Image (cartoon, coloured by chain):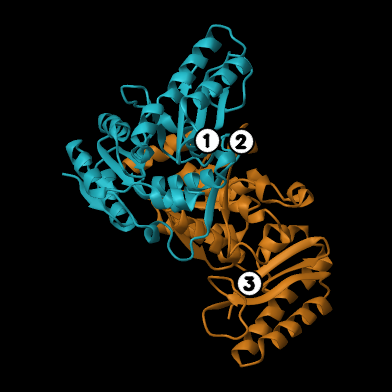
Chain colours: A cyan, B orange
Amino acid sequence: MTEVIRSAAALREKVTTWKRSGMLVGVVPTMGALHDGHLSLARAARGQSDRVIVTIFVNPMQFNNPEDLKKYPRDEARDLALLKADGVDVLFAPGPEEVYPRGFASTVSVTGVSAPMEGAFRPGHFDGVATVVTKLFGMTQAGRAFFGEKDWQQLQVVRRLVTDLNIPIRVIGCPTIREEDGLAMSSRNVRLTEQERSVAPALHRAMQAAAEAIRAGAPVAAALAEARDAVLRAGFAEIEYLDFRDAETLEPLDRPGPPARLLAAAMLGAVRLIDNIAV
Amino acid sequence: MTEVIRSAAALREKVTTWKRSGMLVGVVPTMGALHDGHLSLARAARGQSDRVIVTIFVNPMQFNNPEDLKKYPRDEARDLALLKADGVDVLFAPGPEEVYPRGFASTVSVTGVSAPMEGAFRPGHFDGVATVVTKLFGMTQAGRAFFGEKDWQQLQVVRRLVTDLNIPIRVIGCPTIREEDGLAMSSRNVRLTEQERSVAPALHRAMQAAAEAIRAGAPVAAALAEARDAVLRAGFAEIEYLDFRDAETLEPLDRPGPPARLLAAAMLGAVRLIDNIAV
């Protein structure tokens, strides 16, 4: 049975009871519109915690684009059914006025890892993420938090703020879940037209080819240029970035060596897709 | 017996043991150079918690003036002796590299209450306070935090960030402790010359007179002007602010009504003194 809780006070009461009994609480922060990627996080949480909270909050503070916020898919009834099937204990789904009540005045900011890529193309995005994640950690008092590697840069920002602010929680990154054709699962995929959907896997394919080329010794700049060309040729409208970077610091790399990622964001019609893979 | 702990990891281990036994932890964040004001906080914590941590950390991030940081009084041996006498369980005294290790990149900011007065005269000060306080709350995992009303604006900033970031701690403000002549106790008082020390109580005296005048119906502007004149006549070099404000929002007030404070900062020779009282 999955209990739906909407207020931070009610959640705290529930969590306090659990913690008094020595239970380890796991949290999976989401914006809803759940897919198998989210459910894999819930299952990881289930396996590594005594009680599991999935949060659903479409966080206005992290949307730099009001249209994207408006169009973000929402279907709580369907989400709840999926969480019930997966044995999640609590769906915490607060409204905006519960998360940002009148008088709210605080921001958590992370510099460095948050600056390039998503940070550059979505001004304010990571302040919104860092602030709401800090709040959700406080509200849930969880000991473990599960995030998808799909949002790789977000994962590094969250790891950074947890370390920096000494938040007593362990952050666990879980592998990206993909469709059979390689497209990374994303709540935004439902906004693709049928034609766009058939084009979408080209992003991952081009990144895989670039990763192989770099591993095989090709110059990084050439491999990235070839990948960008391939993505545009396939029918993407625009590439915001397709970069080769240190996996942890997210500094650009011009050759392989330290743990590294290829990371990309590209527009396919009106939908912005992101992806990343290890190199 | 007061145990001295210098690493966040060792502190977390200690605190985890306490919390497993269901103990309520109280924390008193300080910058050391302890006086009776701090000790009254430690005693309040003792009375309202099962275990008491006093932290001593002269936080470079909250000093806008490098000279003030350099001259800030430090005497840990004396501080430890005082805490032992008061039955404090742990003195947590981390070094700067423990609090801000290489790669540190996060900031907690509070707008609104942090903007005027100290925020205006000490740029960046409250970001430093908000960030270190958030860290200390994470490191100590305390359920109660004790702050002096002497730093009234700081207390409002801390209350705001605890509410906003859903930090599971209760913030308790404790009354300002004063010398017999009314001077608010402060670690900076030891830097006053004998002559300055004799002048110093004029600040509190002038504020008391203004509060009485306002309560008696005098126009606020006139009462504040009279207080400023009295402070300068007494020998203070400069008044940074001497304001009448809403006690919680810190918005300026032009007449009494809601809970209100008089708040002031003034330079006496090279020493900056602050004070505040209820009206």
Three-letter amino acid code at disc 2?
Gly
Residue projecting furthest to the top: A216
- Residue A240 appears anywhere in the view: yes
Which chain is disc 1 placed on?
Answer: A
Residue A132 lies, with reference to residue B94, above or below; the image says: below
User: Where's residue B221, x and y in %?
Assistant: 70, 85
For the C terminus of chain B, which image quadrant? bottom right
Q: Residues within 10 Å of mark 2 (few under 14, many from 20)?
A: some
User: Where's residue A161, x and y in %?
Assistant: 51, 39
Task: State which mark lies toward you, 2 or 3.
Answer: 2
Residue A256 lies, with reference to residue A185, above or below; the image says: above
Which chain is disc 3 placed on?
Answer: B
Give the secondary structure at mark 1: helix
Q: Which residue lies under the disc numbered 2?
A: A112
Q: Which residue lies under the disc numbered 1?
A: A160
For marks 3 and 1, give the CA distance: 38 Å
**Which of the marked residues, 2 or 1, is nearer the chain's N terminus?**
2
**Marks 2 and 1 on same chain:** yes
Among the 4 quarters of the image, the one containing residue B247: bottom right
Looking at the image, do the residues carrying marks 2 and 1 touch, with CB atoms under 8 Å apart? yes
**Left or right position of B216 against B189:** left
Task: State which mark lies toward you, 2 or 1.
Answer: 2
User: Where's residue B189, x and y in %?
Assistant: 73, 61
Q: Which residue lies under the disc numbered 3?
A: B276
Give the secondary structure at mark 3: strand
Give the secondary structure at mark 2: loop
Residue at 61%, 80% (x, y): give it.
B253
**Left or right position of B223 against B11:** right
Residue at 62%, 25% (x, y): give it.
A252
Which chain is disc 2 placed on?
Answer: A
